[in-house]
Amino acid sequence: TTSCRASSPPPPEDDDDTGLDFDLDAMETPSDTESLHFPVYDLDLEGERSEVRGQTAGYREDVLDAQGTRWRCFSSGEPLHQSRVNMSVLQPFLRVLSHGGYYGDGMNDIIVFSSCYLPQNRLENYQHVMDNLFRYVVGTLDLMVAENYVMVYLCAGGQKDKLPEFSWLRECYTTIDRRLRKNLKFFYVVHPTWYIKALITIIKPFISSKFSRKLRFINSLQELSDFLPTEHVQIPDCVRQYDQSLTR
């Protein structure tokens, strides 16, 4: 058994922001809409960031068990919580989360979530994959973020059969450490579909006003570059193609 981190002015400082205070489980996912998606990279951060990552208490080297399965353990949160992730089953989906460089002064991180890399919900072991993906996202985000950060959510390229349950999204947000909820300065939703806009409009009265102020709809990659430096943001080809199709 294997045992087990172009600037924009930040919104006003908040206290603990639990954010999504509504019953996501009661909301149904329409079958004819594009999906909401989040990306995860098996991070290999260069230079200074690699050193930070290697020295972080929450990071441990992967371990192979007797069956050849690769496991990764994360330690995060207060009080400290350990989670064990099956990295072998996640291998095809590890580009879902990536580090996109820094903005402003200091170590202000840009975190990118690419919906096109999510698993299809018809996978035989879909629930097992999503359970491990959840623990991977929460644990890796804690390792990636040093101080303040923004989240860039790339909607384009995601298909309706990749749409995760809203309860999964809510659990991701509410399970991350309080430090990460508080230090999230903006949440940029790039190429939002009508469904995502409608969903946010519907749930806005139930969302914390602190979290609401952090949401920004971005219609193009050019517009995104007006808010953030994007030279180190890993943009999937399908997202670039979609963006180019908007100007034809």
Image (cartoon, rainbow, N blue to C red):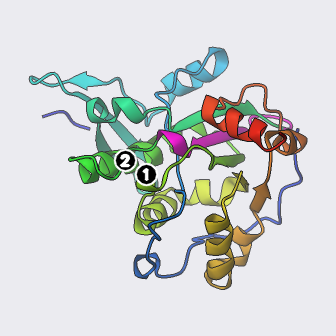
Residue segment shown in magenta: 104-117
Q: Is residue 181 above or below residue 102?
A: below
Give x and y (percent) for residue 13: 78, 65
What residue did someone put label 2 on?
Answer: 120
What residue did someone put label 1 on?
Answer: 162
Q: Quadrant of residue 216?
A: bottom right
Q: Residue furthest top?
A: 47
**237 with respect to 21 (left or right):** right
Q: CA distance from mark 2 to mark 1?
A: 4 Å
Nearer-the-camera pick, 206 or 84: 206
Taking the magenta stretch, the answer to whether it contains residue 200 is: no
Label 1 packing within 10 angstroms: few (<14), some (14-19), many (20+) = many
**54 with respect to 235 (left or right):** left
- Residue sitting at 35 percent across and 29 percent down? 91
- Residue sitting at 67 percent across and 66 percent down? 194
Q: Is residue 61 above or below residue 17?
A: above
Q: Quadrant of residue 6?
A: top right
- Residue sitting at 28 percent across and 41 percent down? 84
Kindly identify the amino acid type of the residue bearing the numbered disc 1: Lys
**132 with respect to 145 (left or right):** left
Q: Quadrant of residue 179?
A: bottom right
